Amino acid sequence: MGQHFDPRTPDLDLLAQAESGTGAAFGEIFRRHSDAVYNHCFRRLGSWSSAEDATSLVFLETWRGRARAVGVDGSLLPWLLGVANNVVRNVARAARRYDAAQFRLPAGPVEPDHADEVASRLDDERRMREVLRRIATLGADEQDVVALVLMSGLSYAQAAVALGVPVGTVRSRLSRARERLAALERAQSEPAQSEPAQPDPAQPGLVPDAVQSRPELADVAATPRTHESKETR
């Protein structure tokens, strides 16, 4: 059996133990928070496969940047999600380059898979990408706050740690995001004019009301999954 750690041990203490040579201590941090990081990455990327890659990178970057780690009430999770926000930007840029390269290659053979599970994952991704398409109307800073507070359920104080900004900045960014989304919602719901403008196919849609008003974005977009379960598919 692996080494047992008291669940009350603060994450920063585990990190210190890992630095002192107790590798299992960092594994405990991973065990505690990998699911939350995995689902947060999915909600930013809209792909379970990309979220898997991003989760690995988040913990790699966590170890490399451990001297900057910040705990909140004994937990590294808010800080980890801040690391995740930076990682997903890089993963998204790499994915766009990869997709462009793949487009120029002939299609490969179709791999057999479990139909029900594949359908479920594809439905998750379709719904999540629709949400992401809608919140793309926001600025990058506002998207980060929406992802942390409305998607992943952090408090304002926790989101402030994740972003490295004052709590007041988190509040103002989220307020601006909600105002902008509400304005877009009103604009979309207005009766059509006598000569309505043609829709712009490049213009993202709007965030669902549930996202504007608060949290359970997982219910809107996808059912959270465990990091381990993804590896078995």
Image (cartoon, grey):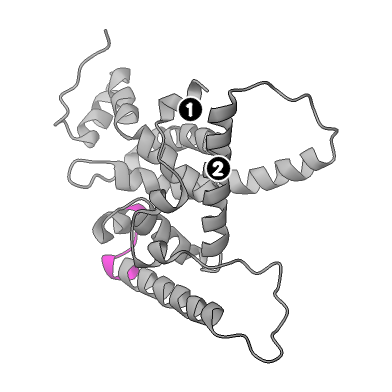
Q: Which residue is mark 1?
A: 230
Query: Is 37 above or below relative to 136?
Result: above
Q: Residue at x 22, y 47 (%)?
A: 72
Secondary structure predominantly adopted by residues drawn in magenta: helix
Q: Front-most of 24 and 148?
A: 148
Magenta segment, which residues? Answer: 162-169
Q: Position of residue 200 (x, y in %)?
A: 71, 73
Q: Front-most of 45 and 200?
A: 200
Which amino acid does the dot numbered 2 rest on?
Answer: Asp
Residue 144, picture quadrant? bottom left
Q: Give yes or no for residue 165 being in the magenta stretch.
A: yes
Q: Is residue 43 left or right of 152 when viewed as pictured?
A: right
Q: Give yes or no for residue 157 being in the magenta stretch.
A: no
Secondary structure found at label 2: helix
Q: Residue at x 46, y 35 (%)?
A: 55
N-terminal of the pair, mark 2 or mark 1, is 2
Q: Residues within 10 Å of mark 2 (few under 14, many from 20)?
A: some
Q: Which quadrant: the N terminus? A: top left
Which amino acid does the dot numbered 1 rest on?
Answer: Lys
Query: Is 194 above or below relative to 33?
Result: below
Residue 142, picture quadrant? bottom left
Secondary structure found at label 1: helix
Q: Residue at x 31, y 59 (%)?
A: 160
Q: Residues within 10 Å of mark 1 (few under 14, many from 20)?
A: some
Q: Please tell me whether mark 2 or mark 1 is closer to you in this view.
A: 2
Q: Residue at x 72, y 45 (%)?
A: 97
Q: Which mark is residue 173?
A: none
Q: Position of residue 24 (x, y in %)?
A: 30, 19
Q: Which residue is mark 2?
A: 123
Alpha carbon distance from label 2 to label 1: 15 Å
Q: Position of residue 54 (x, y in %)?
A: 51, 38
